[in-house]
Image: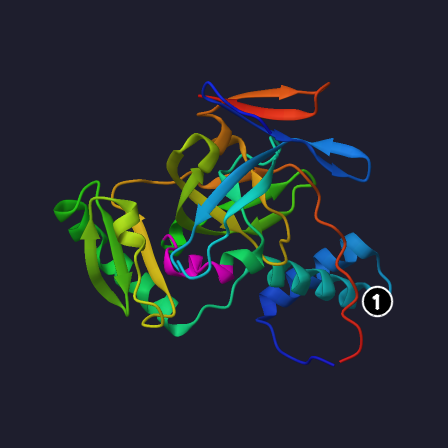
Amino acid sequence: MIKGELPKELEEMFRRKAMEKYGYSKGAISRALEAAVKLWLKYDYESVEEEESNNRAFESMLDELEEKYPGMYVVIAGGKLISAHRSLAEALKVEEGKYMHRIVFKVGEKPFGRVRLGWRMAAAKPAGHT
Amino acid sequence: MEDGGGKACWPYLKVDGAGFPVLGLSVEGPLEAQPLGEAMVRIDTGYDGFLLLSEEKYRRMGFHLSELPRKYWPEGVTIAGEIIRLRRALAVIRIPKLNLTFEGYVDTFHGNTEDLAGLRLIEGLKIILDGPAQLACIME
């Protein structure tokens, strides 16, 4: 049993949407909550602290990197800029075990943001007893 | 498979009686201690990314050590309109039979068990799908 609180406005929107989708039945809210949680689990990732700190570092230094290292492969780890390389192969070399997470990207390159996946997601398998 | 003259071929992968075209790729992850070697990766034109790897392989090969910044991770949209958040990392990909090397993106998502070569990977390659012979070939 999960108990929690939502902001009033969000709760009203959620209840309204659940009723629209699943009808005015007793189980509508539970079904909608289950669908919402499944979607969230599929969509979001837990990130380790190092990943968060690397992404914060990236955001804070992006302008500087674009000015100093255009077209180069930059490595961010441990929450700071580690190195910049002319080739990806160089940037991929890593001291094993030293970092849990690293960011490597080519400065100035903006990758395509949305991809088409030509299939449906299979229905989730029951998790079984816990 | 006999190759030559700048051509490399791989027999279709048989799954439940159906043949799927595959390419023999070698993906280089940051953790060199766990190489994938040449693996048969299915061509899937329904996936318009570069290379999709199973979540397990993505982790094992250390792609969390060459990930793009989170703001550059893509969203994947299924044909049913579901939206999935993908993780994305930079990788070096080789086709050992032709001694070809290129750079690209490796994607994965929660629960993914498939390895697929997408449209962006094959757009730079001359590929012949020989249905009667059940062969996928790359011409140099």
Task: Give the magenta range.
Answer: B59-68
Q: Nearer the viewer, residue B22 or A43?
A: B22
Residue B64 drawn in magenta: yes
> Badge 1 local density, few (<14 within 10 Å), some, or many (20+)?
few
A86 sits to left or right of B11: left
- Residue A98: x and y in percent read 31, 72
Q: Quadrant of residue A1?
A: bottom right
Q: Quadrant of residue B14?
A: top right
- Residue B5: x and y in percent read 46, 18
Q: Nearer the viewer, residue B100 or B56?
A: B100
Element assignment for label 1: loop
Q: How is the image coloured?
A: rainbow
Residue at 70 percent of width and 48 percent of height: A121
Compared to residue A109, the image places residue A6 above or below, namely below
Residue at 64 percent of width and 67 percent of height: A11
Q: Nearer the viewer, residue A19 or A115?
A: A115
- Residue B118: x and y in percent read 54, 35
The amino acid type found where label 1 is placed reads Gly
In which quadrant of the rendered image does the C terminus of chain B lie?
Answer: top left
- Residue B117: x and y in percent read 55, 37
> Mark 1 — on which chain does it sit?
A
Question: For mark 1, what is the residue?
Answer: A27
